[in-house]
Image: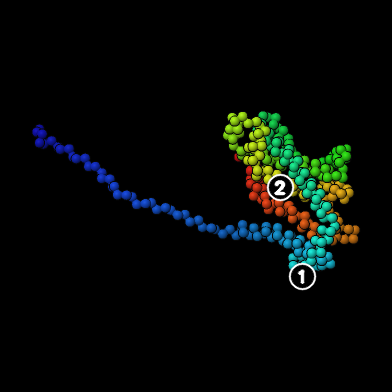
Amino acid sequence: MSHDTLPRPRPVQTEKRDTRPSPPRRRRHWHWTKRANPVAGLGAVVWLAIVVIPIYAMLSASLTSQDKALTGNPLTPPTSPTLDNYNTVLNSGFGHLLANTAIVAVAVVAIVLGLSVPLAYVAVRTRDRWSGLAFRLFLLGVAIPAQAVVVPLYLLIAKLDLYDSLLAVILPTAAFAMPVSVLVLVGTLRDVSEELYEAMALDGASPQRMLFQLAIPMAKGGISTVVIYAALQAWNGFLFPLIFTQSDEPRVLTLGLFNYVSQFGVNIPALLASVVLSGVPIFAVYLVARRALVGGLMGVGGK
């Protein structure tokens, strides 16, 4: 067989690459359509009515004269609004009641912060079994109602010679506000990164320095929540002032409402005017710190 008859190898065909620039890809634009949720809208309207209607009725009644308070529709705006009820409240010792309540609230907040912040810090930074057990035992105070221990508290306060004083109201109120406060602060401090503690430890920082320079600045949201919670407990407290005080000197706002209840009737417009004036300071505090309050409550669960 000759070389001329041998099959010649076929040339390898190389694929020609397209060097032209590829057209730009089209981006997909997702159009989110808002779907109506009539059930949620109806629920929001109902909840708004439940909250707004009583407040409106209270404001309307506080601007009504006493002889017209029990006549007519309570939702009807007053035909002749008057500020006499507010003048009656302000001229019947409201300033003294407000000052006592403010002292109680400030003292309760100071005690709760001074004790709950170090307790929460120790509960978060100490990892032994006894610390966890002590923390769980401390949280049992959340399940104990104040009504169940009011008699032993009365005997203890009487033995300490604190009866009929503001301290008799401040100390129990702070004690019952501390379990929830510690729970909130523990959830907030657990969100602080462990690397930050290790970095400060490498720099030679003491635990006290870590508390004041790291833990407290990083827990501003939880601290704001605790401040508002403790202040509300002190401002709206009724049981402890009723049981542990007797004279007019240590009386607070919640007991001052009895000034408008007599043997022969109740001055409803003045009573509601007193409620409105009592709620204005704490409502103003809430408006100022509402973002920190929500942020602190969201951090209760920790990481």
Image location (x, y in percent) of residue 37: 58, 58
**Residue 300, position in %: x, y?**
65, 42
Residue neighbourhood size for the residue with mark 1, other residues' Cα within 10 Å, grouped as few (<14), some (14–19), many (≥20): few
Using the image as rendered, state which of residue 24 and residue 4 is in the foreground. 24
Q: What element carries label 2?
A: helix
Which residue was labeled with disc 2? 228
- Residue at position x 70%, y 60% in the image: 52
Position of 149 compared to 27: left or right? right
Dividing the picture into quadrants, the one containing residue 111 is: top right
- The alpha-carbon separation of the residues under discs 2 and 1 comes to 38 Å
State which tag comes first along the sequence, 2 or 1.
Answer: 1
Q: 266 above or below 175?
A: below
- Find residue 113 and report its image quarter: top right
The residue wearing badge 1 is 79
Which amino acid, mark 2?
A: Ile
Q: What's the amino acid at mark 1?
A: Thr
Residue 263: image x %, image y %? 90, 58
Q: What colouring style does the render use?
A: rainbow
> Outermost residue, right direction?
263
Q: Which residue: 84% across, 59% down?
A: 91
